[in-house]
Image: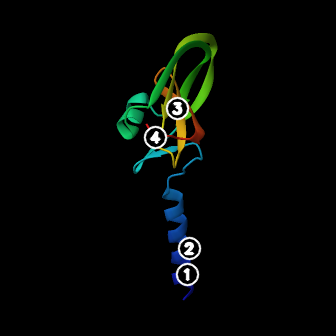
């Protein structure tokens, strides 16, 4: 009897460790997930075109991405294109805004309820 309980416990540990961690600010588009560190092309593929876009340019510290995390590197500031993509998901869901720097998602914000177009 003991070995069976042990196998169940081991199976649970394996299944839970394989489960994808979903962060509060991630956005589910249908059955696909979009997260910080994803490229603009992936966001468009999974979520479609944004409802609204805004473009800025700004100086930011130089960074690299490793395993979906931003790491600041020495070397000074650089000018980047910053895009804000807003997705209006309708009056029953919160809107989401992606902040992209040089085509990479660096922040996902939850806004107020959407509206009918």
The tag earlier along the polypeptide, 2 or 3, is 2
Pointer 2 residue: 9
Percent from the top left, x then y, of residue 103? 46, 23
Q: Categorize mark 1 by other alpha carbons within 10 Å: few (<14), some (14-19), many (20+).
A: few
Depth check, mark 3 against mark 4: the one in front is 4
9 w.r.t. 83: above or below: below
Residue at the location (47% across, 42% down)? 89
Pointer 3 residue: 98
Please state which of residues 110 and 93 is positioned toward the viewer in this rendering.
93
93 w.r.t. 48: above or below: below
Pointer 4 residue: 116
The tag earlier along the polypeptide, 3 or 1, is 1
Q: Is residue 87 visible?
A: yes
Q: CA distance from mark 4 to mark 1?
A: 52 Å
Q: Could you tell me if the residues under marks 3 and 4 are in contact, i.e. CB atoms within 8 Å?
A: no
Q: CA distance from mark 3 to mark 1?
A: 45 Å
The tag earlier along the polypeptide, 3 or 4, is 3
The tag earlier along the polypeptide, 4 or 1, is 1
Q: CA distance from mark 1 to mark 2?
A: 6 Å
Please state which of residues 108 and 106 is positioned toward the viewer in this rendering.
108
Q: How many marks?
A: 4
99 w.r.t. 112: above or below: above
Q: On residue 5, which mark appears?
A: 1
The tag earlier along the polypeptide, 4 or 2, is 2
């Amino acid at each position: 009897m003991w070995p069976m309980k042990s196998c169940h416990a081991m199976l649970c540990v394996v299944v839970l460790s394989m489960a994808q961690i979903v962060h509060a600010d991630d956005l589910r588009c249908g059955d696909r997930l979009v997260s910080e560190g994803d490229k603009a092309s992936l966001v468009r593929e999974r979520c479609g075109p944004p409802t609204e876009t805004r473009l800025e340019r700004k100086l930011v510290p130089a960074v690299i991405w490793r395993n979906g995390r931003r790491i600041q590197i020495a070397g000074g500031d650089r000018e980047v294109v910053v895009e804000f993509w807003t997705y209006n998901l309708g009056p029953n869901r919160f809107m989401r805004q992606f902040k992209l720097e040089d085509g990479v998602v660096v922040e996902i914000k939850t806004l107020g309820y959407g509206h009918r177009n």
